[in-house]
Amino acid sequence: MVGFIQLLLWLFYFLKKMYHVNIMLIIFNNLTILTKVIFFLFILWFFYNLFDFYKSELKQEKKKSN
C-alpha cells in the first residue's frame, strides 16, 4: 500500500514539473464543497486506518519477540 502511495506522489510530482501546474488545484477546481468535504474525510479515515494498522502490526511483532 505504501508503494502505491509513493507511486501516486511521484506521478503528481512528475506532472507538476512537466506541466508547471498545481495538480491539486486541477483536481479540486470543479468539485462541489460537499464533494471536497467527503474527500477530506475519506483521506482522514484512510490515514487513521493506516496508522492503526501500523500500530497493531508493531504490537504483534513485539508479542512474537517476547
Image (spheres, rainbow, N blue to C red):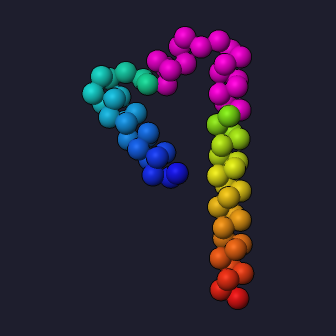
Q: Is residue 27 left or right of residue 12?
A: right
Residue located at (50% from left, 52% from top): 2
Along the line of sight, the residue nearer the viewer: 2 or 19: 2
In the picture as drawn, the residue positioned furthest to the left comes out as 18
**Is 9 drawn above or below residue 39 in the view shown?**
below
- The image shows residue 37 at horizontal and vertical percentages of 70, 23
- The image shows residue 42 at horizontal and vertical percentages of 68, 34
Q: Which residues are magenta?
A: 24-41
Q: Is residue 14 left or right of residue 63?
A: left
- The image shows residue 51 at horizontal and vertical percentages of 67, 55
Residue located at (37% from left, 21% from top): 21
- The image shows residue 16 at horizontal and vertical percentages of 35, 28
Residue 58 sits inside the magenta stretch:
no
Q: Is residue 32 left or right of residue 10?
A: right
- Quadrant in the picture for residue 12: top left
Along the line of sight, the residue nearer the viewer: 63 or 16: 63
Residue located at (66% from left, 43% from top): 46
- Quadrant in the picture for residue 54: bottom right
**Is 33 drawn above or below residue 61 in the view shown?**
above
**Is 60 drawn above or below residue 6 in the view shown?**
below
Residue 40 sits inside the magenta stretch:
yes
Q: Is residue 9 left or right of residue 40?
A: left
Quadrant location, the C terminus: bottom right
